[in-house]
Every structure is written in structure tokens, then in C-alpha cells.
Amino acid sequence: MARLWQGDLTALGALYDKYSSLVYGVALKGLQSLCEDEALTHDVFLTCARARTYDPSRGALAKYLTTLTRSRAIDRLRARATHHKYLKLWSLMQLSTQATTPISHATQQERQTAVAEALSTLKDSQREVLELSYYQGLSQREISERLDVPLGTVKSWARRGLLQLKEQLRHQLEDVMQ
């Protein structure tokens, strides 16, 4: 790792040769998707090359790579679940809008307007994170990389924004739930 951090790219090849089967095995067990497993393996080694998050005093490199791979696999599973959830919701919305009555159409437009207005009251950072997540389907890790901010910051902005939206849209949510 020290050689890699000093810019020796041959060290990345050596690390890959030694640990790729371990990383790929963990990715395969977690994701169970050949394409995603390969992409995750690639991502883990690129992370090693870019970030200096490995600390040898905290444990062996194999354990670090296993933990990193498992964490990234969980992130991808969450993103996949979120993506499927919103695709399903979107398809339900499409079905419901195909046979709308004038009243239901007006109600839907009112809700969309209320959400847009509530979003406009959020801080720019909170609004941007929520729009990237819900409208573009990006995971929080992808948002973190796109905005070049720490993952924890993205999570904070999303949580605060959602709590503010929930409070602002409380009445609309109550109407929908009834």
C-alpha cells in the first residue's frame, strides 16, 4: 500500500493479483450479480489507489479489503432497493395517470406543486441531495462522489431535508393516508 500511495502503479497490480479473488468472493456473496460483482471489485481497488483510508496499525489488509467490499456491497444493495422501489412507484403513478379523472388529476397537480414549493424552501445542499436521490436515482455514495463531499455530510443533508419536507407536507401526507 505504501508503494501505491507513493505513485507506484505496479503495486496496484500486485495488490490486485494477491487479493482480487478475496474481494470478488465477498462481492459475489453479497450482490449475487456477475456484472455488479466485477464492478464492485474494480471500485474497491480504485478506492485503495485513491484514498488513504487503510491504517496497517488497525489490522491486516485482507480484513480491510473485506470490510470495504462488504460495506460497498451493502451500499449497492440499498441503492438497488431504492431504485426498484421508485421504479415500482413510478409505474404505479403511470398506471394511475392513464385513467385519471379531472378531480384526481387536479389533486395530483396540487401535490406536485406542494412538493415543489416545499423543496424550494430547503437549503440548496439539502434540495440538491434529495433531487439527485429521488429524481435521478443516485445512491448516497454516488451523490457524495458527484458533489465531492463526505458521505456522512450527504446523509445529514438528506435526513434534515426529509424531516423538513415531512413537516411542511404533513397535511398532504395525512390526506393521502386517509
Image (cartoon, grey):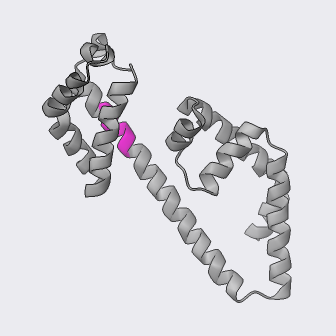
Quadrant assignment, res 153: top right
Is residue 72 rendered magenta in the image?
yes
Which sits in the foreground, 171 or 11? 11
Left or right, 45 with reference to 76: left
Residue under the image location 19 percent in, 44 percent down: 25
Q: Position of residue 121 (x, y in %)?
A: 85, 45
Residue 112 occupies which quadrant of the picture?
bottom right
Q: Looking at the image, can residue 15 be seen? A: yes
Image location of residue 15, percent across then percent down: 19, 27
**Residue 131 part of the magenta-drawn span:** no
Q: Quadrant of the N terminus?
A: top left
Location of the C terminus by quadrant is bottom right
User: Which region is colored magenta?
Assistant: 67-73
| Residue at x 80% of width, y 81% of height | 104
Residue shown at 65% from the left, 75% from the top: 93
Q: In the orientation shown, which residue stands out farthest toward the top?
A: 57
The dominant secondary structure in magenta is: helix
